[in-house]
Image (cartoon, rainbow, N blue to C red):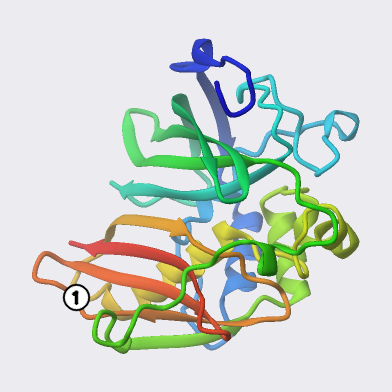
Amino acid sequence: MAANEQDFSDWGGKTEVSYDIIDPALAERLRTTLLRTEQTPATGVLPTLGHWCYFQAPAPADLLGEDGHPQRGGFLPPIALPRRMWAGGSLEFLAPIPIGATLSRHSTIGSMQAKEGRSGKLVFVSITHDYWQEETKLITERQDLVFREAAIKGNTASTKSKTTILPPSEETPAPLHSQTLRGDTVTLFRFSALTFNSHRIHYDRDYAVQVEGYSGLVVHGPLLATQLAQFAEQHFANDGRSLRHFDFKAVSPVIDTQHYTLCAGSEADDGCVPLWIVKDDGVVAMRAEARFL
């Protein structure tokens, strides 16, 4: 691949099957991390996007890279670019996940694309995950990863990279619903633990700032997506309808010292709802679309 002078064409189509039990205790810890005590009580099914807490490979500590991620070369190709981010994804929800159930996940490496961006060399990797309970498919998911070059010493991601600013009001109307949150360090710690995510940008401030070039700890993209999807459910999952599709794309990192606002626009006739997250400086952090049927 041109971006890092490596060819990973043999990785395309590579598959992996893994299994996990939807542990009730882990599900409850996730619910209490994301929800306030006065909100929806526990049910017998996993909260939306809660499956990201499961199917986490128990990588030994001595097989982790400097960034805290498991070293590549197993299922993921050994791309030399050091920085890895979850750039977005697309999910179709076919049936709820029962708590206590045993599930299988069938993963396939899809497209791999090298690009040259403003921040340097990039490699995009797409992975498809199908989640099954015996013969019933529950979720189909596409996960988009991006691998990037090392940060330039002395620069932070908030100052050296171009960011997407909220479009003018005539193009993006005021949200129909909104909720302001803050990515505090306790929530970041708890979500890292729940997802067995040892990426140091979420808990090691010195590493996040000095090595990866951020201005503070980074709020997990999956945490933001989970909050946004569940926020949409609170307002649009009614009259027997449920969330059937959710597409999201990370646009700009959220730092733990920032407030950010979950926003939802008006629902279209086909059940699609535009969603976005805007930071306290007016920069869009995530764009998404949910569909309720």
Secondary structure, mark 1, is: loop
Residue on which the image places disc 1: 267
Query: Residue at the spot x=47%, y=30% of the render?
Result: 113
Q: Quadrant of residue 140?
A: top left
Give the quarter of the figure containing the C terminus.
bottom left
Above or below for 60 versus 1: below
Q: Nearer the viewer, residue 93 or 261?
A: 261
Q: Nearer the viewer, residue 165 or 127?
A: 165
| Residue 58: percent from left, percent from top | 75, 34
Horizontal relation, residue 187 to residue 134: left or right:
right
Query: Residue at the spot x=14%, y=72% of the render?
Result: 268
Query: Residue at the spot x=75%, y=40% of the render?
Result: 69
Query: Residue at the spot x=52%, y=55% of the render?
Result: 50
User: Label 1: few (<14), some or many (≥20) within 10 Å?
Assistant: some
**Residue that lies at the very extreme toward the left in this rendered image:** 269
Above or below for 211 versus 74: below
| Residue 128: percent from left, percent from top | 42, 32
| Residue 139: percent from left, percent from top | 36, 43
Above or below for 97 versus 42: above
Q: Is residue 208 visible?
A: yes
**Residue that lies at the very extreme toward the top in this rendered image:** 10
| Residue 80: percent from left, percent from top | 71, 27
Amino acid beneath label 1:
Glu
Q: Quadrant of residue 133?
A: top left
Give the quarter of the figure containing the N terminus.
top right
Q: How many marks?
A: 1
Q: Nearer the viewer, residue 256 or 31?
A: 256
Q: Is residue 45 visible?
A: no
